[in-house]
Amino acid sequence: IGWQAGTLTVTPAPLSLSYAANGASSVYGAGLAGLSGTVTGSGFVHGEGLGDLSGTVQWSTAASAGANAGSYAIIGSGLTSGNYAISATQAAANGSAYTITPAPLTIIADDVTKGYDGLAFSGGGGLHYAGFVNGDTQASLTGSLLWSGTAQGARDAGSYGIA
């Protein structure tokens, strides 16, 4: 009787990982806040768990300190194993995005003095700004300047608001 040796092939077990990011936020122009979240898995065998996987959980986002205000996805990754065929999903939990909120900008109307001439005042004077970040300037603003306040149409001597 002749024996012929066979081969045992152990294939990776299917494993589902779910990366659920914790929401985070910062103000436009500020540094990014730390990213974090939780990972859960289903399909472990023989009493194994997340601690038996290789790698380190990493959280990333396309947001940066120079990114525009808005919402950006936070993505989890990094866990690996030769014993598992891992399929990973990003949990779309409420609040799992990175949000960059607008930076406060104050536009200040300069004081104007006008001698009484019986004519209605319209417009304003100069402006100055407080709060630009990331190298932004007045040129970064869009839209049209509109003057308002009690000074618009004022004829008589007195003090009036310019906005």
Image (cartoon, grey):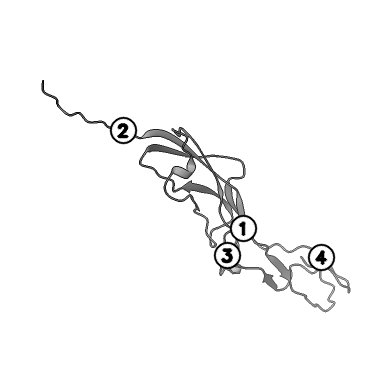
Q: Are marks 2 and 3 in contact (CB under 8 Å)?
A: no
Q: Which residue is mark 1?
A: 26
User: CA separation, marks 1 and 4?
Assistant: 42 Å
Q: Quadrant of residue 13?
A: top left
Reading the chain from its start, which is encountered first: label 1 or label 2? 2
Element class at badge 4: loop
Element class at badge 1: strand
Instruction: Give the residue type that dot 3 points to.
Output: Ser
Instruction: Give the residue type that dot 4 points to.
Output: Gly
Q: Is residue 4 left or right of residue 24?
A: left
Q: Which residue is mark 3?
A: 140
Q: Neighbour class for label 2 at 10 Å: few (<14), some, many (≥20)?
A: few
Q: Which residue is mark 4?
A: 153
Instruction: Please tell me which residue is depicted at 60% across the width and 48% down the height of the picture.
Output: 23
Q: Are marks 1 and 3 in contact (CB under 8 Å)?
A: no
Q: x and y percent of residue 108 in the render?
A: 73, 69
Instruction: Please tell me which residue is depicted at 44% across the width and 43% down the height of the picture.
Output: 52
Depth check, mark 3 against mark 4: the one in front is: 3
Reading the chain from its start, which is encountered first: label 1 or label 3? 1
Reading the chain from its start, which is encountered first: label 4 or label 2? 2
Reading the chain from its start, which is encountered first: label 1 or label 4? 1
Instruction: Please tell me which residue is depicted at 31% across the width and 33% down the height of the picture.
Output: 10
Q: Quadrant of residue 130?
A: bottom right
